[in-house]
Image (cartoon, grey):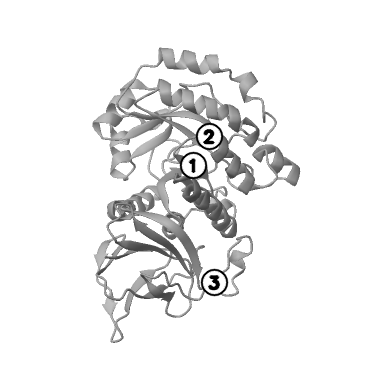
Amino acid sequence: MAPYARDERHVREVKECGIDFVVCMENDRPALDRMHRYGVGAIVTQILPGWWGGDGDNAGKMAEMNPISGYEAAADTFEDHPAIWGIDAGDEPSALDFPYYGRVMDLVDRSFPHQFAYLNLYPNYASVAVNTAHETVNQLGTATYAEHIAQYCQHVGTDYICYDFYMYSASVEGAYENLRIVSDACLRTGRSMWIVLQVNSNREAEWITENQLRFQAYSAMAFGAENIIWGCYTAGWWYNQVLDEKGEKTEQYDKLKKINAELHTMGDEYMRYRRVSTHFVGFQGDKVLSKVNQDPIASLSTGIFADVREEAGGNLLVGQMVSRAGDGSYALMICNAADPMDAAPSMEWVHFRADHRKVRVINGAGEIIPERQDDGSYRFPLASCAGALVIAK
């Protein structure tokens, strides 16, 4: 968060926007004091030796350039603060540095007992918008993205995997494949999925719409995302951030505030469940699945829920979930995926069965009552790019 957004007014507006913590915050003690008063946390940079994978030229050189002694010295001189929730350990490393990063992250966890070590990974298109195959391999340090994530899980012991994906500067189909790879890795290794999404634009004349923000969040939640981070609130890269270079709100502020309010409305109930699988329901003949190694289905039946589909055959992302408490309840996280580009918004109708179970449906506005049909099935409306949590007990 840039220095021009750290005074009392701006910190208050961060809280009012529904933001729980900020990333890329310096160790600015007066600003941290304000953030603590408003209940906003910080993942703080410039505590540890910095590292960014960049274009891959430094791949495999982290141990030489950032020896362990630098991390030990940083821990010895660190002064704690209640607003510091996490310590930034770097961004987008090559897999060639994962074995060393495993040592670094273990050291940070031991040395900073009140904070977690934060590390963000490349997306599947690596870190540049246009790159050659050679550059991609240099950045990832592996021949494929799936191998990149597998090596991270092998060498780095975080209880989460965090990566960034900027859908509207890359592609929807790439986003789906990235979600599938990371969410499945989280499932296999018992980790939480964190994701950095875009609120700014890589083209100055374009602004990310409210529905595009909504779609990024709810599609990630259909794959079980537990932590959603937005880039960027203040000037960082590209254009059209939430605040302009003078610290004034842009049109993105109210959009982001609205979406964050929806996520908070659903959040408590959503977090009672964990993802076990995700399905592309509909999508018949849709080229958007061209990069996704998963076939679409016409309807979903899980043994608890049956005949889950959009009534007119539209596209739904459906995350199958089970209770974390093991209380016998189940859930579906459903995202309306008919119009991810927000080109032609429309209302879709979700149909499902959950025989002999009590059913609840929660969307971004709160709990709604699904329509019970004569045959015992249910239906409810779901707006373009929106999401809903369906619970059966």
Question: Whole-Å distance between the Cαs marked 2 and 3?
Answer: 36 Å
Which is more N-terminal, label 1 or label 3? Answer: 1
In the rendered image, the quadrant that contains the N terminus is top left
Residue under pointer 3: 283
Residue under pointer 2: 156
Q: Residue 98 at what x, y percent from top left?
A: 59, 32
In the rendered image, the quadrant that contains the C terminus is bottom left
Residue under pointer 1: 162
The residue carrying pointer 1 sits among few (fewer than 14), some (14 to 19) or many (20 or more) residues within 10 Å by Cα, namely: many
Which type of secondary structure does the marked residue at label 3 adopt? loop
Camera-near label (2 vs 3) is 2
Which type of secondary structure does the marked residue at label 2 adopt? loop
The residue carrying pointer 3 sits among few (fewer than 14), some (14 to 19) or many (20 or more) residues within 10 Å by Cα, namely: many
Which is more N-terminal, label 2 or label 1? Answer: 2
127 in relation to 330, above or below: above
Residue at (54% x, 71% y) in the render: 283
